[in-house]
Image: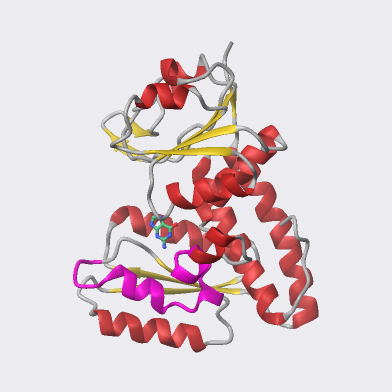
Amino acid sequence: MTAKRIDGKAAAQGIRDRIATEVDAFRQQVGRVPGLAVVLVGDDSASAVYVRSKARATEQAGMQGFEHRLSATTSQDELVALVDRLNADPAVDGILVQLPLPPQIDEQVIITRISPDKDVDGFHPVNAGRLAIGLHGFVPCTPLGCLRLLQAELGELSGKDAVVVGRSNIVGKPMALLLLRESCTVTIAHSRTRNLPEVVRRADIVVAAVGRPNMITGDWLKPGATVIDVGINRTEAGLVGDVDFTSASEIAGAITPVPGGVGPMTIAMLIRNTFVSAARREGYSYEKSL
Ligand code: GUN
């Protein structure tokens, strides 16, 4: 049996189209469009590619994009001053400062400076705390996109065994909390986990977010498992995930490819969070399933 290939690109396009329709209705009622400010410090080439696709998606959804490109030598004070200006700007509903930042800037200082109500990345401690205790807030885009793919694939997730491999603040930890919110039995595995293949083999749902090319192979999987591969690893063989797609496809029930799986969903969720931010700020009611 070959696993179903989960088409993240198509799912993301569907969501972006729905949001474009919502943005149009928002504009007619509120008299402005949602705005997203994206800040890139330095010239990391991968970050530049991400920022460009975020800007393109913003425009395609009919929203206003504000791009700020700062030099690699920007000081922390200068970046803080920009964040303060964006916090105060009524046309800006979402603020995203692309990570990683250059070494002279403390990422936590910047993340904490962004107004929690414009934190469409969901990285602010207030939003992380809201997710942890079950309050409304902003959820990080990548794990939210993974959850949407899982729900589209499996429907109800309640009672399923989920293993999240990786414990980062951006993906692993919020992913585990989202799966817990959906009443999964959640295990967070990481580099110190003993018998990792055995742990992964228990899972109905595997989310891989470790950054090690092709680490998870087909023999680690429970037959029929749903596998979400968050890894984006640049190797000599090109872009590969954390899951060995070829062997995993023979055992899994469904699996996301790299590229074309999680990546497009991350951007769709950023657009979604920006729209939701604008709607909340304006007291505009929107389709909750968005
Ligand atoms: N760097 C890698 N992923 C992300 C993300 O989702 N948001 C931001 N701001 N930076 C990132």
Can you give x and y, in whole percent of width and height, for residue 22 in the image?
75, 65
Q: Can residue 50 be found in the magenta stretch?
A: no
Q: Can see residue 107? A: yes
| Ligand 1, image quadrant it occupies | bottom left
Can you give x and y, in whole percent of width and height, for residue 128 in the image?
49, 63
Question: Image quadrant for the C terminus?
Answer: bottom right
Question: What residue occupies the far top of the structure in this picture?
Answer: 1
For the rendered model, the colour scheme is secondary structure
- State left or right for residue 234 relative to residue 24: left
> For the point 56% across and 44% down, which residue is it?
146
Asked if 48 appears above or below 149 in the picture, the reply is: below
Q: Which is nearer the eye, 173 or 120?
A: 173
- State left or right for residue 157 relative to residue 145: right
Range drawn in magenta: 102-128
The quarter of the picture where residue 18 lies is: bottom right
> For the point 52% across and 55% down, which residue is it?
141
Asked if 74 appears above or below 49 in the picture, the reply is: below
> For the point 31% across and 68% down, which residue is it?
107
Asked if 71 appears above or below 201 in the picture, the reply is: below
Can you give x and y, in whole percent of width and height, for residue 261 in the image?
53, 38
Can you give x and y, in whole percent of width and height, for residue 222 in the image?
52, 19
Question: Image quadrant for the N terminus?
Answer: top right
The quarter of the picture where residue 61 lies is: bottom right
